[in-house]
Amino acid sequence: MKAPQIFGLALRLTGLIFLYYALSGLPGSLFKMVDRLVTLSLWALLQTIVGIVWPFILAWWFLRGAPFVMRLAYPNEPRDS
């Protein structure tokens, strides 16, 4: 394996870590979101939704190989999947 492939694998493993983090915190965050709905606090509800969604977005981006980071780290490498 070449260095760009190893770096890409490390990025994808980071994506798995973010996915685990997001899934492990999901039940507690959903209960918190229901509590925010009951109290009708819109700002707190928005913060809770962002807190639930951002780890999934990061996990998805890293599992795709974080294309921007790969281009930044290895600018002269040909793009392959």
Image (cartoon, rainbow, N blue to C red):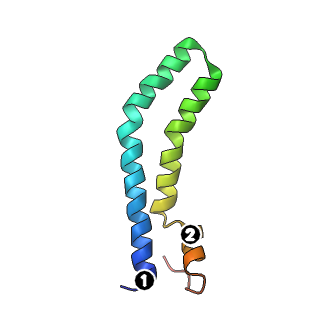
Name the amino acid type tagged 2: Val
Ranked by sequence position, the earlier of labels 1 and 2 is 1
For disc 1, the marked residue is 3
Other residues around mark 1 within 10 Å, as few (<14) / some (14–19) / many (≥20): few
Name the amino acid type tagged 1: Ala
In which quadrant of the rendered view does residue 63 lie?
bottom left
Element carrying mark 1? helix
Residue ID at (40%, 68%): 10
Residue 63: mark = none
User: How far across and down, in percent of the image, does residue 29 sit?
Assistant: 44, 30
Other residues around mark 2 within 10 Å, as few (<14) / some (14–19) / many (≥20): some
Q: Is residue 58 above or below residue 74?
A: above
User: How far across and down, in percent of the image, does residue 37 sit?
Assistant: 54, 18
Residue ID at (39%, 46%): 21
Q: Is residue 31 above or below residue 49?
A: above
User: How far across and down, in percent of the image, does residue 4 sit?
Assistant: 46, 80
Farthest residue, direction top = 39
Residue ID at (46%, 54%): 59
**Which quarter of the figure is the N terminus placed in?**
bottom left
Distance in Å between CA atoms under marks 1 and 2: 14 Å
Residue ID at (37%, 31%): 27
User: How far across and down, in percent of the image, does residue 39 sit?
Assistant: 56, 12
Q: In this view, does 37 lie to the left or right of 23?
A: right
For disc 2, the marked residue is 69
